[in-house]
Amino acid sequence: MPRMTLQTQLVLEVLLREPDRQRYGLELSDLVGVATGTIYPILARLEQAGWLVSEWEVPTSYDSVGRPPRRLYRITADGAAAAVAALARSRARHKRTWILGVEGA
């Protein structure tokens, strides 16, 4: 299971909104609000865990204007199920920590 950092959770939440949609790294970086230097290692870990699949986009005549092809990422069905469970566990753990912290004050 990949590390569930806050940034990883945010990436998963974005991908889960439209699980059939392919997204590229810079787009995810903008949506999540973190640097590309943070996004790409997260995407690599999620792909290595089997939660994501990726492929290079097929160039079109429009792309020949100078933009290189982008790597497109999509969450898998198994990845979506694992992500939903992992996010629920993380939220429950944070909620307990917050409640315990407030009660201990």
Image (cartoon, rainbow, N blue to C red):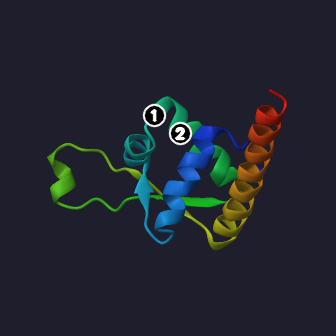
- Determine the image quadrant of residue 59: bottom left
Q: Residue at x 24, y 44 (%)?
A: 67
Q: Residue at x 58, y 54 (%)?
A: 12
Where is residue 26? Give x, y as percent.
Answer: 38, 42
Is 68 left, or right, of 13 in this rendering?
A: left
- Label 2–label 1 contact, CB within 8 A: yes
Residue 87's label in the rendered image is: none
- Determine the image quadrant of residue 81: bottom right
Near-viewer residue (18 or 58): 18
Residue 40's label in the rendered image is: 2
Residue type at numbered disc 2: Tyr
The kind of secondary structure element at disc 2 is: helix
Residue type at numbered disc 1: Thr
Where is residue 66? Give x, y as percent.
Answer: 19, 43
Q: Residue at x 67, y 63 (%)?
A: 84
Q: Above or below — where is 38 with respect to 66?
A: above
Near-viewer residue (14 or 44): 14
Q: CA distance from mark 2 to mark 1?
A: 6 Å
Near-viewer residue (83 or 42): 83
Is 105 left, or right, of 25 in this rendering?
A: right
Local crowd at mark 2 within 10 Å, few (<14), some, or many (≥20)? some
Where is residue 104? Give x, y as percent.
Answer: 84, 30
Q: Residue at x 51, y 69 (%)?
A: 19
Is 103 left, or right, of 76 in this rendering?
A: right
- Determine the image quadrant of residue 96: top right
Is 98 left, or right, of 63 in this rendering?
A: right
Quadrant into which the C terminus falls: top right
Q: Which residue is mark 1?
A: 36
